[in-house]
Amino acid sequence: MLWNVDGVRITRVVEHVMPFAVDFFAEATPAHVAAEPWLVPDFVDSRGWYLMSFHTFVIEAGGRCIVVDTCTGNSKDRPLIPEFDHQRRPFLADLAAAGFVPESVDMVVCTHLHVDHVGWNTCLEDGRWIPTFPRARYLFGAADIDHWSNSEDPLHASAFADSVQPVIDAGLVEPVVADTSLTAEVRIRTSPGHTPGHLSVWIGDSCVITGDVVHHPIQLRYPEWTASGDLDPDAARATRRELLAAAASTNALVLGTHFAGTSAGRVLLTEDGYRFAPETAG
Ligand SMILES: [Zn+2]
């Protein structure tokens, strides 16, 4: 998938898609999902489970190549999630086939430091985790570095150890403390709630890469729903409402970090709340 927004090219490279049960959102019931038949087949499967995509967006702007989120990675020890555990996926070959060899990447933005957003930061070579993108500056929310470097959560502590600490040790990380422009067009904005140092990426006011501010298109119908993993649900709700209102007000192209299908659409504000209008590439 490829989009052009205000002279900026954005390419999606998918690592994998997997289904999640309805209770991924604590407030959701099968009836809620069944009441949104437009979600099938791109966003909900025939059993009524959410389809979640794990993909990278590559932004080409101002002569820079920026990778946003690095999925789950290969060879990682993740016994708690079989779909993430010691995988052998062709993601780097797919990224290269899309035109992006690791050496061509100037920046890596991890919207946050959860296990499914940091995986390809590193690769295993001769028993050591080394940075996958050797020329890149890696931008992580400073509050996420603080939080996850002190976490005892077994899943995310191991992700920090094998996919974050090695790039810190290599001197490649720039902690992000506030909204920051990466090029004339591309700006990262702090969007806390899901995690304390969460970041979203905007192309002017014309396009937003959500990160995990929104996990699934059904959350446009139910912005109050909390996702599994929202560390501060109230802050996450407030940030989600702010992002959706901003995207609706400028008719921005929304690129969902876990949206399956084309991953893209617009936020429409109706008398009955928000609607998601999926969009193909272009
Ligand atoms: Zn995620």
Image (cartoon, rainbow, N blue to C red):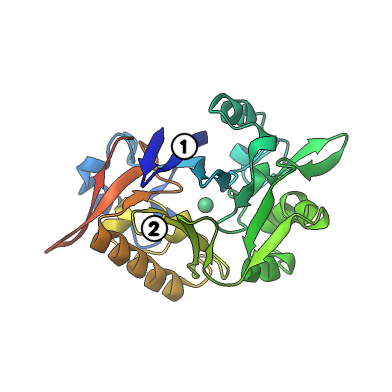
Determine whether 89 is above or below 4 in the image.
above
Q: Quadrant of the C terminus?
A: top left
Circle 2 packing at 10 Å, graded few (<14), some (14-19), many (20+), is some
| Mark 2 element type | loop
The correct choice, above or below, for 202 with respect to 16 in the image is below
Q: Tell me where residue 242 appears, x and y as whole percent.
A: 35, 69
Is ligand 1 within 8 Å of the beta carbon of the residue shown at mark 1? Answer: no
**Residue at 30% of width from left, 54% of height from top?**
252
Q: Disc number at residue 204?
A: 2
Determine crowd level at label 1: few under 14, some 14-19, many 20+ residues with C-alpha closer than 10 A: many
**Residue 227: percent from left, percent from top:** 44, 60
Q: Residue at x 43, y 54 (%)?
A: 24
Q: Three-letter amino acid code at disc 1?
A: Thr
Reading the image, the residue beneath label 1 is 11
Quadrant of res 165? bottom right
* Residue type at the position of mark 2: Gly
